[in-house]
Image (cartoon, coloured by chain):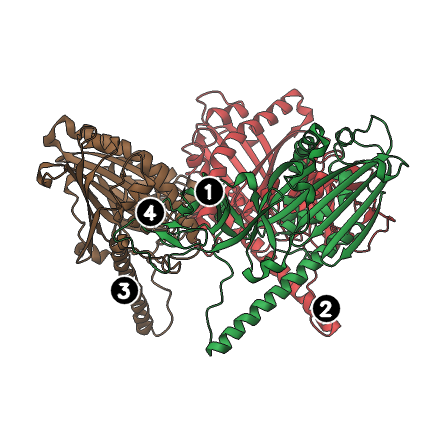
Chain colours: A brown, B green, C red
Amino acid sequence: MPFLRNAWYVAAWSSDVSQTEPLQRTLLGESIVLYRDSLGRPVALANRCPHRFAPMDGGRVRGDALECPYHGLRFDRTGRCVHNPHGDGRIPAAARVASYEVEERYGAVWIWMGEPERVAVTPLPAFDYLDPQENETSTGYLLTRANFQLSADNLLDLSHFQFLHPDTLGSNQMASGTMTFDEVGETVWSRRVCRGEQLQEFVANAYGVPPGMAVDRWLNVRWDVPGLMSIEVGVAPSGIPREFGRMSYSGHFLTPETETSTHYFFAFGLPKAMGEAARTLVEYAVDGLMTPFKEEDLPMLEAQQCALGDQDFWQARPVLLSIDGAAIRARRIMDRKIATEQLEQQARIEQCEAEQGGKTPMPELTAVPIDCSALAR
Amino acid sequence: MPFLRNAWYVAAWSSDVSQTEPLQRTLLGESIVLYRDSLGRPVALANRCPHRFAPMDGGRVRGDALECPYHGLRFDRTGRCVHNPHGDGRIPAAARVASYEVEERYGAVWIWMGEPERVAVTPLPAFDYLDPQENETSTGYLLTRANFQLSADNLLDLSHFQFLHPDTLGSNQMASGTMTFDEVGETVWSRRVCRGEQLQEFVANAYGVPPGMAVDRWLNVRWDVPGLMSIEVGVAPSGIPREFGRMSYSGHFLTPETETSTHYFFAFGLPKAMGEAARTLVEYAVDGLMTPFKEEDLPMLEAQQCALGDQDFWQARPVLLSIDGAAIRARRIMDRKIATEQLEQQARIEQCEAEQGGKTPMPELTAVPIDCSALAR
Amino acid sequence: MPFLRNAWYVAAWSSDVSQTEPLQRTLLGESIVLYRDSLGRPVALANRCPHRFAPMDGGRVRGDALECPYHGLRFDRTGRCVHNPHGDGRIPAAARVASYEVEERYGAVWIWMGEPERVAVTPLPAFDYLDPQENETSTGYLLTRANFQLSADNLLDLSHFQFLHPDTLGSNQMASGTMTFDEVGETVWSRRVCRGEQLQEFVANAYGVPPGMAVDRWLNVRWDVPGLMSIEVGVAPSGIPREFGRMSYSGHFLTPETETSTHYFFAFGLPKAMGEAARTLVEYAVDGLMTPFKEEDLPMLEAQQCALGDQDFWQARPVLLSIDGAAIRARRIMDRKIATEQLEQQARIEQCEAEQGGKTPMPELTAVPIDCSALAR
């Protein structure tokens, strides 16, 4: 399955991109280097020097440019070579690397690896609770060796809490909760209500529920293309309206590293207006979730990927249950958008060929076809 | 080379299959999960939940059924889904996994991964000395990263003792011993007699031979399809008839994990009637053999596999020596049976197509095409 | 890209080939075993016994022959089986392994894996400073997981010292030095002159330059087919003619292990006539270079290989700079010679076919198509 290119992906948390240490990250199968220029603006370039194919993340930031660590060529934020230290210093016209549009929001550096002209018409979904101006936020990151849509499936159906996370997140009332689904434009919602739940200690503490108190829990998951998710959880004493309960808000961003591995970014945010408690709670949530995410979800996702082998999801002919309503809607939206994008690209190629009266090299959307992530780790 | 499917393979030692800890084992390239139901009967299922492809060996045994660890579907010994904890609890008709015939004998769980109707006409060869009712037994297991027939070759020609195991099993008289071969139906025998041998200390102790005493040693190896071997060794003071010597009996069961890796099960047995000595001797044998098997045979088998690379045995055009008589007979029986099985399957496919007047999907003999063993370890 | 077979390659340093411990080394993708016969002469054989494909480097040297560790067949320096310990001891005619011409010079064992009749017309280039009769020498070895021509590129353009080795070998004056190139027959020269350099401490010490003294440095690199290089460096106080400076001499031999890995042999030599200082200096050079070679060059070469992926060098369309003059010349010579060799082989095959009136099996240049190096390590 090709990647959807005309979409925003999280490339890194803002705090991981610096002026001093260029960051290598394989995104959509391409090795990318991220750094900040002298104004602090993030830059994303294809991470392969066109001279001798050296990865540039080992180089130094020189003013606004990144210097290749092998022979010292320097490239600016547009990917143009701006300095050749050798001989007469002439810069060959071909000395360029691909550069990518980036945007910094919600504490993250977002990257656009599709057609530049579509950036303007593709807004980010809102994750206002992660806006660092107004909120205390805490972030987590995991690399998962599984296709990113398996992670989306996982998050769109939280009934697995009961079986995969029985000691932290789940309860015996999860599977019997009610689920509803919604599809609004290209946004998918999954909503679950569990009544009369006995929460596990980790969750109870997060919402200030005393031991033994039965509660109602609402879990609303919002999914947007390509894998940008918001999870809102409300907890209130059983029978009390939701408005009187406590809420948590988290963003979950899935970026394909390769077809079978995923950068999983997640973050909690609460208003600074809550004072000290906001910071305490968002850190409690991220720190506490790291264990079940890493020790229960991650092995499960990797085992699914392994069981799939060379098959894609539909080829493996999954048996569908009622709980899969949101995941299936999200997958179908992605399937449709990828198919459209492939057709459009094919049409452009044919138009080029017609104009030029013959076969032409395919316009390259991709910059660096090689996944060096195995070596980088 | 395809696997021979209409044959009994050892899936596990009986003691490794339990009601509490489902066991994952890749057999003939398929991931299988083994557990015991509430009556203690072993169950073998394809280890991939049809809902989201989760491996089920991480799940719990619930009564007679196995519960998937991801979303809690439960499957019984026939592979049928018997419980869906979600929504209205309806069970989709497609919610099934492949199940396999199993039989418990000689201290092992045997699995049949071929056509069910052939089970009844395929008896197990006898390994009476491993019947746990009558015998003290001790078992060993090694995973060998080489094709299982390389292990059969190894065991069918014990002349390698002199070169590969000079300090434990071999002697200078091994290579000069006499060898004879027999083929009776689909059973192959290799018989070696070594006269006037000075045994290494490890072997001498096993047979109660005092230091320095010259002995005669008989080594009889029996092979049955697909790689079920019995080794009978007799030792007597040189010139004394075999009837007055001491004997040992061991079973060696080779089950392909994949085309290039093998579950090697081996066990020694002696009659309980021998008293305490039986237990002492069978444990001495298994414990003592583990070292040469693991440190000498196993690296050699893996080096052979590596040297073969993508070639199969015959493509590599082996030079044949007199000592290869039994190994070659066994290989030819296997080649013939596999070829026959493939032809029969092809004929069935063609018949199906003829009946249905067109191409039909190939009847699936295999349940789980994916080898997850790499991840499982 | 096929390997150039009609060429001398270093197989091992002389000191690594012994009568007691056969040495496995994968060369040009083939597993080779090296040992010395009873006269101390090196022997190179294909490392795969024709009986059961056991690698023979685990065996013992018996007089002039090498004994297979599995079943004891013995092979002499011509590859002929000379002993079968089994049965009547008859030796099948097919029991042979490929053997290779070897030559011992400059402290190394050289191997010829091409057509035997071309040995005589293919002299080694001179590395007189490594002749152990006249010189103190010190040797180093690294395995690099990158194509050997990337290493040649690296050595033919030392301008990378400034960027990749700024704290040991480089200086700010390197990139601005002057470079000239020469191609004489199939020998390529790259000559660099840097004036007014402030040497790093490691280099300054090697040439006895006091701290702070500005010097001129000459770096002359000679390349011969297939990757045999000599580097001559001269250092003199700035403005003083080269004849009054100090020199160092090193040989650098690149032997493909596989298409994407390289045995890198390097050695320094100085005349014994220099007395104690010669030994001190050659050891200082090899020991000191090991760190930048291993920690800076080697990761860079491997990252280049990774970035290339399945592309070969030209497919990746490198941007050429003035500094690449020598590397490109050397690559073109190799490309030409490999193409010629392939055409000649094709012509021989066609001639055979014509003579025999039909298709014949391709004459095998290669002995062991399987790379066992992964396992060997």
Tag 1 subunit:
B
User: Are labels 1 and 2 assigned to the same chain?
Assistant: no
Chain letter of disc 3 in the image = A
Residue B87 seen anywhere in this rendered image of the structure: yes
Image coordinates of residue C313 in percent, x first then y, are: 48, 53
Q: Nearer the viewer, mark 3 or mark 2?
A: 3
Please tell me which residue is depicted at 72% across the width and 40% down the height of the picture. Answer: B249
Question: Where does label 1 land, which residue?
Answer: B22
Q: Chain of mark 4?
A: B
The residue nearer to you, when weighing A292 against B184, is: B184
Categorize mark 4 by other alpha carbons within 10 Å: few (<14), some (14-19), many (20+): many
* Residue lying at 78% horizontally and 53% vertically, measured from the top left: B325
**Residue highlighted by disc 3:** A340
Kindly identify which residue carries mark 4: B71
Which numbered mark, 1 or 2, is in the foreground of this view?
1
Can see residue C228?
Answer: no
Which amino acid type is marked by label 2?
A: Cys
Q: Earlier in the sequence, mark 1 or mark 4?
A: 1
Residue occupied by mark 2 = C352
Amino acid residing under circle 3: Thr
The reply, left or right, for residue A35 in relation to residue C97 is left
Q: Locate residue A172: give its quadrant.
A: top left
Tell me where residue B69 appears, x and y as whole percent.
Answer: 37, 44
